[in-house]
Image (cartoon, grey):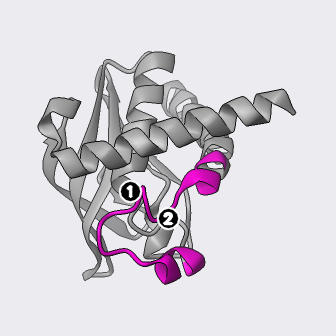
Amino acid sequence: MLKDKIIDKSIYNIQALLLPIRKQLEKVWGIDTAYPGVSNNDLLFRPSAGQCFVTSWFLKTKIEKNSSFTEVVIKRGKLICDSKILILDHCWVEAKYNDISVLIDITQDQATSNDIYVSVKSTKLKNYLYIDERKYHCLSEVNGEALSRIDRLLKKMETNLCLTCQK
């Protein structure tokens, strides 16, 4: 029972930390960081459209540097709701500490009205089901085009954070 309360509090803390990161990311997401095929029109109505892969890598690096999680991986697969595939090719973060797994997705709103999800010990969040088909542990597993998008996002975030600090 105490363990569940600690986990619930940790999830709340993670969600609270992710909100400002999401806001910062919204300022730098663009067609240059989006998955190929995403249009400017898509981004106008759904800023996170096509941003799940680069955002997951950004979160992975932040989590690895600033947490006690023992393993942080990017997962890629399908997002399903009520037996309907919402996103055929989606990415999110899974972080592990001992026997606890935490699923983090801050770009789910490209298919839904929700923007941040954190869950423990499950691939099911509310009525959403995450089915992973591939894992990424390090950048050497990523192709050149995706690496370029990740690099652009990281540079834009660094610039944006520097401008924010100067204000």
Q: Nearer the viewer, residue 150 or 82?
A: 150
* Residue 19: percent from left, percent from top: 65, 47
* Residue 77: percent from left, percent from top: 20, 60
Q: Quadrant of the C terminus?
A: top right
The residue that disc 2 covers is: 48
Q: Up-down: is 3 above or below 102?
A: above
Q: Is residue 63 left or right of residue 2?
A: left
Q: Quadrant of residue 97?
A: top left
Look at the numbered discs 2 and 1 and tell me whether their residues touch, using CB distance below 8 Å.
yes
- Which secondary structure lies at badge 2? loop
Q: Which residues are magenta?
A: 24-45
Is residue 130 a member of the stretch shown in magenta?
no
Q: Up-down: is 8 above or below 77?
A: above
Residue 137 visible, this angle: no
The residue located at (19%, 39%) in the rendering is 136
The residue that disc 1 covers is: 52
Q: Quadrant of residue 81?
A: bottom left
